[in-house]
Structure formats: structure tokens, C-alpha cells
Amino acid sequence: MKRREIDLAVIGGGPAGMAAALAAREKNIKDILLIERNHRLGGILKQCIHDGFGIELFNETLTGPEYAQRYVEKIHDKRIEYLTDTMVLSLSPDKKIIGASPDGLLDIRAKAVILAMGCRERTRGNIAIPGSRPAGVYTAGCAQNFINLKNYMVGKDVVILGSGDIGLIMARRLTLEGARVHAVVEVLPYSSGLPRNIRQCLTDYDIPLYLNHTVTGVCGLKRVESVRIAEVDDRWRPKPETTKEIKCDTLLLSVGLIPENELSNAGGIKINPDTGGPIVDENLQTSISGVYACGNVLHVHDIVDWVSMEASKAGVKAAEYLTGIKTSECNIKIKAGCGIRYVMPDMISGTRETDLFLRVSAPGRNKKITLKDKKKILSSVPKVRVNPAEMIKLSLNGLDLSGVNELEVQLEDG
């Protein structure tokens, strides 16, 4: 086993990991090691050949590979060391990393660690779809990988369960490749994808979206032959009398993303049950001093530009930790109240400029987001429209939080 000591280890070579490493280098941290389990840097962006990336950061629309390549080139320009084909097996509370590489096992002792492992898709097993187990059932991201990177067509007659952004984008991608997408089926009464993707990927191609529906069965022996769908009631239970069968050879699943936090759990890092990611303060520091989290491993983002911006902050804060710059104590707890699914970060100091990032529980119009200390309203921000698919950034700049112990965020009628 090869052992080495470094200042900063960044686990994950996707957009978050690269942005974090670059930000730390800009703060004069020299000894940085970026660890990526895949063959190349770039993460999931390598297979996202559609455009729409980079508008916030670069003021232009890029494809996923183009966006990733800009960061890869910066990694090379700044001569940041990275390892590919290297899987991190464990992370201990004292920041000891064990990894498996083509050269054997690695024992890496880091002074600070940034977690940037991204997220993974929920599978059929996660949502327990009944029926047989034939070929032709894929997660949407897996199908995207097959088509865009391996030039393999997954099917000709397709049903998609879930209206997440990857599923919507794949509905369009499959249609352009000559497949017929018979339906996108969503158990919620609203789409879980961005409105622009509903328009550009479904409406523009006349692909039907069945809200308040789910897949109740998969039929077929060697290959999917059909799926059964049914309307659900207000408790998400299928209504048998509404069942109908759709002939198809492929079922794609776009039923949500889960932050990759097996390492975090095993390393003793506290996890937020609402996000599935680590509990962090306003510096993006986890419950273990010197360990930071950013990107989709922290909470699932809808725009990659925000991933990069958040990761850059993590890189800066890790650099400050390494250089001995003290940060303010974070003793104000942030609580998600009525109508709010989650709020990030979990703790703030109240003494410096801070932004909150949040998602609402359901879509709505003419709402307002209120910040409360116990029953006292400290701030109220009107919102013409809110959507769970779109993360909301809320600035606390100029807000007097002296004497506040808990700040509750609520969604109310405007």
C-alpha cells in the first residue's frame, strides 16, 4: 500500500470537484490531489451532449462536454494533480483516505477534504415496481450513456416513468434517434422537471405527459413487451379501474437522484434526512472539522453553473481552513417550515453575508417566502411563481440576526 500526505484531497472529478480544486489553487494551496473513479475527468457532463450549460458562468450556452472541457483545461493549466480510475473505498474521521487505483491500494492522509462525489439515480429496486424482470428496463442516465457515449440504441418503443429533467431530455433524444416515446408517466400532479424542458422535450414533440399516474406492472419474459399504468389517488395508490396497457420494448426510469454519501456515512459525517447530503454550515463544512461538501453530493442541483459556484466556495473555505483563517461560529439553526422541502445551509453565523438555497414542496403562484425567529417575521420576499424543480436563492444580506437562535423559512400566500 502506497502512503502519501497532502494538504487537500478532493473526492470526485466532476464539475464540483474541479471547481473546488481550482478555487483552492487560486488561494495558493499547492498540494492538491483530485481523485476520480472514472477514466476521465468531467463526471456526468461527458454524456450530456445537449446544450443549456454555462449561461450563468460563461454567458453562453454550452453542451455538457464543452462545459466540462473548460474546467479540465484549467486543471491542466494550473497543474493540479489528479488520479483517474481511482475508487475511494473509505474516509475516516481523521481524514484518512483509502483508495484503489491501477497501481494498487493508496493510503492518503489529508489535512482537509472536499466531498464532490455527485449523485446517482434511483433504480427499479428503490421504487419497487412489480412485474417480471425482462431486459429493456433502464434508468434514464444509463440510457443516455448508452446512446451518447457508446452509440447503442436502447429501444424503439419507449415509456418513461418520472418527469425528472434527465427523463425529459431523453424523451427528446430518443425521438430524434427515431424511437417512439409513447408516454411520460408522473405520479405527482405536476412535473418534477424544469418548465423549459417540458416545453422543449415533450410539448414540441407531441409526447403525452400523464400526471397522477404510475407504472403498476412490467410485462414480458426475455424483453419488455408492455407496461401497465394507472391513475393514483391522493395517497399515491393506483386505481385499478383506470389501468391501461401500453405496448413497448423499453421502460426508462427518471424517478429522482440520491446524493452519493456512502463515504460520508461511513466516515461519521452527519446527514440531513431531507436532502440526503451532509449537514453543513455556511462555510460548507460538515460535522467533521476540515471536511467540506459541495455539488450534488450535498443536495441535488438543477443547474450545473450553481454546482460550480457552490464548489468554488467550498474550495475557498477549505483553503482558509488550511491557512489558519478563523471563521465565525455558526450557531443559528436554519429550519424548513411549512411549504419548504429543505433549506441549505443548516447552520449560519448571522455575522456575514450569506445566501440560503431552498426548494418548495409544491408549485404555486403569488406566494411569499418569510423568514421567522419564533413567531416574529424578520423578512418577506414575494414570489410570482414557485416550482419544486427550480432551486431558489435567498439572500440574507442586510438582515439583522442578532439574538436569533433559530431561523425558520416558510412559504405563504402572497
Image (tube, rainbow, N blue to C red):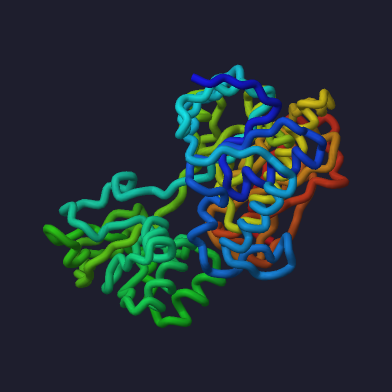
Residue 393 visible here: yes
Along the viewing direction, whichever of 339 and 109 lies nearer the viewer: 109
> In terms of image quadrants, where is residue 234?
bottom left
Does 34 sit left or right of 351 as displayed?
left
Extreme residue in the left direction? 221
Q: Residue at x 25, y 52 (%)?
A: 129
Quarter of the figure with residue 65:
bottom right
Q: Where residue 328 sits: x, y (%)? A: 82, 28
Relative placement, left or right, of 69 versus 402 is: left
Report the residue that reaches farthest toward the top: 94
Front-most of residues 336 and 258: 258
Q: Residue at x 40, y 71 (%)?
A: 171
Residue at image point 61% right, 38% down: 34
**Residue 341 showing in the rendered view:** no
Which of 340 and 52 lies nearest the eye of the viewer? 52
Residue 269 is drawn in which quadrant?
top right
Q: Is residue 47 left or right of residue 115?
A: left
Could you tell me residue 3's position as x and y percent?
Answer: 57, 19
Residue at 36% x, 55% y: name it.
139
Name above or below for residue 325 compared with residue 257. above
Where residue 346 sits: x, y (%)? 66, 35
The picture places residue 253, in percent across and down from the top left corner, at 35, 58
Quadrant showing the C terminus: bottom right
